[in-house]
Amino acid sequence: MRLSTITNWAYGATVALTLASGTTMLLASHVEEEERAAVAQRAVFDQLTATLEEDVYRLSEQARGFVVTGNPSHMIAYRRERAALRTVEDRVRHLKDAGASLAELQALQQALYWADALLDEQDAALKAAQQDQDATARAILFGDEYGREMDRVASQVAKFQYMLDQRTDQAVARATETSRLWRTMSEVMLGVTALLFLCVLYFILKQRILHPVVRLSDVVTRLAAQDYAAIPPDLRQVDEIGDMAQAIRVFRENGLERQKLEQERERDRASRDLLSRMTQRLQGCDTMRDLAEVVRRFTPEIAPLFAGRLYVQDSRSGLMQQVCAWGQPTLSRADFPPSACWALRRGQPHRPAGTAIDIPCDHLDGVPDAATLCMPLIAQGESIGLLYLERAEHASTDDVVRTEKYIEMVGENIGLALANLRLRDALREMAMADALTGLANRRHFDEVLSYQVEQAERQRSPLSCLMIDIDHFKHFNDEFGHDAGDAVLQAVGRVLGKALREKGNAFRLGGEEFVLMMPGFGPEQALERAAQVQQELRDLRVDHRGKPLGPITASFGLAAFPDHGPADRLLRTADAALLRAKREGRDRIVVAAARDGAASEAA
């Protein structure tokens, strides 16, 4: 029941009991008034009956006084008082109007009858006294019969008073009992009203209001401080306090939802910030190593529920090869052919496990229901890499769905970075490579030479430089045409490109001049490798339009650091040795002079 209803009922009951108590008090007061009226009536009757007896005795005394003394004053007083007497009917009517009953009036009438008989005897005695019959007058007024009649008057008056006393006592008793009853009922109703008031105070104010409000106040204070761990009390009563508790419970639920949304926004903000920073770092990557490091550091922060690997397709082998990993993935192999992954086949993200049945990829080592995600990295319609992820066991579905949105953006950014890196490498290769021979050009040579010289000087490691010039190259152009000369340059470039295990150390400086940089090679090793290259060029046979172009030879100038001078003058020293080889007849290897002046042998 609602507090307002309880309060209204209590108020109504209190008002009703108060009215009833007031009514009983009024009734008790009315009964007391009746009691006082009965007592007042008794006083009136007593006064009337007392007047009757007084009149009888006073007239008797005046009459006796005249008979005994003969004093006329007694006669005058007697006649005056006799004239003042009212008739019996007047006296009875007066008592009847005052409330006397019929039986009481009959008793009083009998007394008045005897009183009138005494008046007649008094008149007879006075008349006899006036006629000087004193003995007769005395016999009348002092005789036994006169005394008996006076006793009868007193007896009837006493009877009347007794009846009056009986009735008055009964009326007073009834009035007293009724008044006591109404007063008791009034007191009981006042007690019930007070008890009801106290019960209302205790039940409503303390039990239904004070205790719940104190509990709710603590919860509201904590909720106001955004402490949503505070749990509202379970107040199921259907009243205003219950409505308040329900409202606070709804407020707490809404607060939890807002807090959850704020946390999600904060996580999204942090993830977007990480994604933005990752994108900026990816755009600044110059090498695949830089890109792999950025992916390895940022991806676990953006997608902490996933372990994974980044695969890039190797241009030589055609295999997808791992370039970095995070979170200790265990299911996928380190390298595999593109056909082993359904994501690369379809060009779309692939999940072998989940609500929809799908086919597991072959690179998962036979795990059919693994919670994995393969996301192809596509640039210009071509799959150039793969982002592979393994979901953690404790990850919830909501967190996974939220994270996968960022994984898609991560994959897009990595794909763009890979495409930019490949494009940059291609442009660099085009800018740093000789279009005819495929070897690095002079620009690239200058960068490599500066780097290798710095490394050799810092690490005090040997560095050799072999300058190569094709002998009589103009002869090929003049006799067979420039296409034949280009064929010779291409053939020489192929030989030099395979001369060293390390790629990128063979250069075409321009025209028919080439350079081989051999880091870590001393003079003896470099001379041996130069002899091998010289022999391969001698054995080289090049045909142009079905005609052999003849033997191909070259002159070699070899210089090594630190044996032949400072590293920064290594190219100049090797060039000087090449000029000596040309002057000495070509098709030979000339080693630069040692720093101590000892001449090196020519091959």
Image: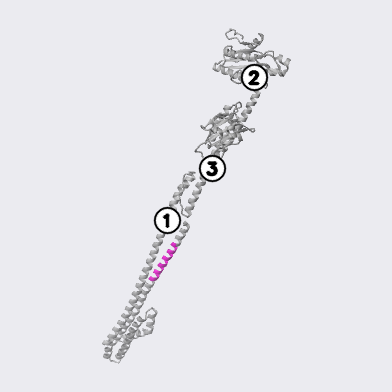
Secondary structure mostly seen in the magenta stretch? helix
Q: Earlier in the sequence, mark 2 or mark 1?
A: 1
Type of residue at label 3?
Leu
The residue beneath circle 3 is: 261
In the rendering, which numbered label is found on residue 203? 1
The single residue placed furthest to the top in the displayed view is 598
Graded by Cα atoms within 10 Å as few (under 14), some (14 to 19) or many (20 or more), the crowding at tag 1 reads: few
Tag 1's secondary structure?
A: helix
Magenta-colored span: 13-32
Is residue 571 visible to us here?
no
Q: Earlier in the sequence, mark 3 or mark 2?
A: 3
Q: Is residue 293 rendered to the left or right of residue 483?
A: left
Type of residue at label 1?
Phe
Tag 2's secondary structure?
A: helix
Q: CA distance from mark 3 to mark 1?
A: 42 Å
Q: Is residue 45 rendered to the left or right of residue 254?
A: left
Q: CA distance from mark 3 to mark 2?
A: 64 Å
Q: CA distance from mark 2 to mark 1?
A: 105 Å
The residue beneath circle 2 is: 494
Q: What is the x, y in percent for residue 583?
A: 66, 9
Q: Residue at x 49, y 45 (%)?
A: 224
Is residue 400 visible to us here?
yes
Q: What is the x, y in percent for residue 294?
A: 56, 30
Graded by Cα atoms within 10 Å as few (under 14), some (14 to 19) or many (20 or more), the crowding at tag 2 reads: some
From the viewer's side, name the closer residue of 401 and 194.
401
